[in-house]
Amino acid sequence: MKNLNHLPIILLKSSILMFLIFWTMLAEHIYINPFIVLSLLPIFILCVIVICLTIVPFLVFNKKRLSRNEIFKKYFSYYAIVAFGIASYGIIISDFSYFMSAFLTSLFFTLMYAWVWLFNSSASKNSKFMNYD
Amino acid sequence: MKQIILITASILFSILFYQQDIGLNLSLFSILTVFILLIKDWEILRHQDVILKMSAYLLTGVMVFFYHSTLVILANILSFFTLIGSVSHPKTSLYINWLNGIYTSIASYFSHIYDRAFAKKPREVKKKINYFQWLKIVGIPILFTLIFIALYKKGNPIFHELIEKIDLSFINIHWLFFTLLGYYLFYNVSRPIVIEPITTNDLVIGNYLSQIKIEQNDHEKLNNEKQLGLVLLGMLIFLIIIFLSTDVYYLSKIYGMTAAELSKQVHYGVNALIISNLLAIAIILYFFRGKLNFYKYTSGLKKVSLIWIFLNLIVVISTFLKNLEYIQSFGLTYKRIGVIFFLIVTSIGLITTYFKVLQIRNMWFLFRKNFSIAFIILVLSSTINWDKLITYYNLNVLSETEINYVIGLSNNNTFQLYNYSLNNQIKQDDLKKIEQKYEAYLQSLEDNTWQEYVFDNTKLK
């Protein structure tokens, strides 16, 4: 069983981060009311889907039994480049619309932080699975 | 100190780009980036490679101000990533420069915070920040400056007017976010990183194939492969000779062709050439992928391969001649210039393949040389005002010209077209279109903010 005890906390942290970046970027263009808090739910679902489908598999399907640090060093660069490419493409084809720019920018930075948190969480350092989880 | 430079650079980034179109700002940004890189580590200038890439970046930056075309902007962005990648590790190949440049620009910050948090060494105990002292250093001077501004405003009406003119209404959350993005970019650029293990691998792998020892039982297999190569290339050479003889016949009739026939010929010729040349390179690379390079009985196969490359080059020349005739008869267009570029790149691909076979080089040699040459061509082509060149050729050299095509080009030829319309007799409809283009361009130039200035702004009276 992989050591992913800290994953729920990281998902929550990521959702809050994306929520903050997204609404701060849109603050100039739309009226912000207290009900925007409700958007935390879809943002949380989105973070769960994207992080679990695109980042967690690097840990789960780690057949070469690489340490977290090795996985980060090996794959993060390519992940960042691909994520940046997709986000930039999305922003360009949306003709730089405020909504899509805010959405994709916040998602990109959230995913970058999720990598750092997931592969460097204190839980992983203290765990006996530190090197081969 | 470094933080102050980064904060200043990020504010300048916002001033240059926030809600602005591309123009002088991209040129100034290129200079700012080079400045930041040199402040961070001026010793990068010791590497000739970095100096060359820096020059290419600054050159494309200046060209954005002069020509403001999509090609120049793309060349500038690519040169930016090349330079950043080169600073990350100067001795790597161009395509590794690009990867390292993109990675540094978009994620260096995250890589650093990860490394810092994961470092095995205990972190150095940081000196405790005296916030009260900072508050005094920043707060008291600001307070007194504001008081004195209020006093001087009352004492001098010109100073009062000057202060009233300062408009800080552009500062909002969006602007701050944009500035933060600028800070993120400059932070990344000033801390170059590399992707491993591809960077180390690239440095380790040379341009030559490693010597492979041929065992006794390899002989039969290599001999079979050599025979297959000889038969296959022999057949292809026979075919290409027939093709070339029919092509010579075609070239003799080219002068009597209509535009449609010639267009069809050039386009079919180019399409066939793309596939033919890629196949030619692929076949040669397949046979000379390993042991056959060191097999002593392959001189025949090598000669046949070189003849095959040479004949492919003749096909390139034949297509070039057709394209040239097409241009001479029906004018210069972007597509026809694109064909010339493609033919140049193809010829270089074939010539480097020739050297690969002759000097027993590896695949990486081909990638390195071809990418470098393609990049040089891109940078050099960005220094030419293609719209102006096309317009000049079509209006002054051709007897009959398709004026609608040149009117439809970018604004780089607007003044040239307008002058032409003043000095020559042209149809009323065309004159109207040129005047409309001219008026619209003048208006857009007048509307440009200083960040969006282009060279044509200097021509306004």
Image: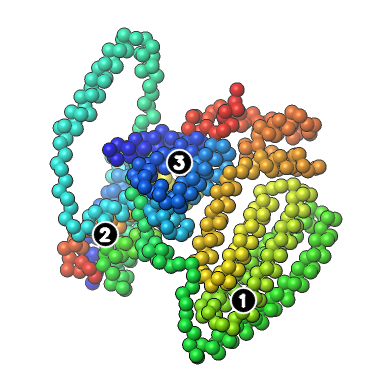
Q: Chain letter of disc 1?
A: B
Q: Are marks 2 and 1 on the same chain?
A: no
Location of the C terminus of chain B by quadrant is: top right
Q: How many marks?
A: 3
> Which mark, by number, is residue A118?
2
Q: Chain of mark 2?
A: A
**Which amino acid is tagged 1?**
Lys
Task: Point out which mark residue B302 bears.
Answer: 1
Q: Nearer the viewer, mark 3 or mark 1?
A: 1
Both marks 2 and 3 on one chain: no
Identify the secondary structure beneath mark 3: helix
Q: Residue at x 26, y 59 (%)?
A: A118
Residue B264 visible to the viewer: no
Residue occupied by mark 3: B30
Residue type marked 3: Ser
- The residues tagged by marks 2 and 1 sit, at their Cα atoms, a distance apart of 54 Å
